[in-house]
Image (cartoon, rainbow, N blue to C red):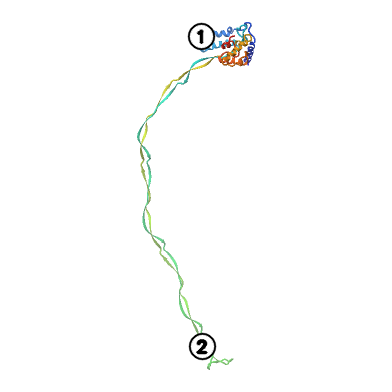
Amino acid sequence: MKKQISTFAVSALAIAVLSGCSATNNTAQVDVKQSAEYKALQQELAAAKSLQGDANRTAQLESELERLTRESKTTSLLPPNPKAGECYARVVIPATYATETETVQVRAEGKRIETSAPEYTWAEEQVLVKEAYERLEVIPATYRTVTETIQTAEASEQLVRVPAKYKTVTEQVLVRPAHTEWKKGTGPIQKVDSSTGEIMCLVEVPAEYKTVTKTVMVEPETVKTVAIPGKTQTVTRRVVDQPATTRKIVVPAEYKTIKVRKLAKPAAQHAIAIPAEYKTIEKRVKVSDAFLEWRPILCETNTHPGLIRELQLALQAKGFNPGRIDGVLGQDTMAAVNAYQKAKGMASGQLTIKTLKSLGVSI
C-alpha cells in the first residue's frame, strides 16, 4: 500500500512539472554513491573480482549496485542535474532483456535393447495319443437242456360215500282178516231173525290180501376211503451249465509320430548405450526491471503548435495515428506517442526529448 501511494504522488508531481521549468540546479539531490552502503558493496565487488571468487556472487553485487543507482534516480522527488529552461517528468523505463544461448538436454542418456530372434529346428517325436488301460470282457453263460419228472400233485386219500343198496320185493299184505258174518239164506241151518222173520245164515268170510311191491334196503349207506395216486409231469428246461464271468483285457497305449519345433538357440538381448542429446537454444533473459526515471520533456516553455504539428506528421509517417493534425497535444496524439515509445522499447508515459529526436523532430 505504501508503494502505491508513493507512485501516485510522484505521478502527480510529474504532471505538475509539465507546466514549469527548472530555474536552478538541484542542490538537495543526495549522491547515492557517497552512501556507506554503496561504498561497502563497491569494496566487496572489487575484492571478489581480484580474487576471482564466485561468479554468481559477483553478478549479485553488480546487480545490487545497479539497483541502488536506479532507486536513487526513481525515488528522488526532483530530477538530478536539471538544466535551466528545461522541463522534466518521471517516465517509465522499460525492462531490458538480453538474448542468451543455453545448452539444454533434450533427451537423457539411455540405452537401447537389441534382441536376436530365437532359432528352431524340427524333430520327430513320439507322443502319447491314448494311454494304456484295462477293459473288462464279459464271457456269457452256457446253458444245457435237462428233462425232469416233477410231481404236480401228491398222493392222497379221498372219502367216497357208498350209497345204500335196495331191492324191490312183492309181498301179500293182509287187508281184511278172515271172519264170519250173517247173510240171508235159505237153508234149515240158517238162523231166523226174530224181528224180521228172515232166515240168516252165518257165513265164514276168508281173509283178504293185497299184493304190494316195495323197495327194501339190502345194504345200508357207508363211507369208504379211496387212495388217490400222486400226479407227475415230465418237464424239459434250460439250465445254466457255466455261469457268466468277466476277464481283464489290457489295451496297450497308442502313440503317434509328429514333427516338433524345438528351440535350438534361445533369443538373446544386449544393451546399446545411447548418449544424451543436447540442443543450443536462445532465451530472452531480463537484465533489468522497468523503473521510473526523470527525463527532459516538452513543456509550455519549449513547445509550440508548429512543433506539435511536426510531431503529429512524424507519427503519422511512422504508421501511428495521432488524430487530427491540429498542432494540439491532445489525447489521440499522446496515445500515438505512447504506442511509438513502447514499440521502440523507449521510456513511455511522457513526450520526452529522446522521443522527438527518434522521430526526427527538431526542437
Residue 133 image position (x, y, % from top left): 38, 42
Circle 1 is placed at which residue position? 49
Mark 1 closeness class: few <14, some 14–19, many ≥20 residues within 10 Å: few
- The image's mark for residue 241 is none
Circle 2 is placed at which residue position? 204
Judged left or right of residue 206, residue 240 is left
The amino acid type of the residue labelled 2 equals Glu
Residue 303 image position (x, y, % from top left): 62, 10
Asked if residue 192 is positioned above or below residue 264 in the image, the reply reads below
In three-dimensional space, the C-alpha distance between marks 2 and 1, rounded to whole angstroms, equals 221 Å
Q: Residue at x 55, y 8 (%)?
A: 42
Quadrant, the N terminus: top right
Which one is in front, 87 or 269? Answer: 87
Judged left or right of residue 103, residue 94 is right
Judged left or right of residue 132, residue 330 is right
Q: Residue at x 53, y 9 (%)?
A: 45
The kind of secondary structure element at disc 2 is strand
Residue 35 image position (x, y, % from top left): 59, 7
Judged left or right of residue 19, residue 208 is left
* Name of the residue lying farthest toward the bottom: 188
Contact check, label 2 and label 1, Cβ < 8 Å? no
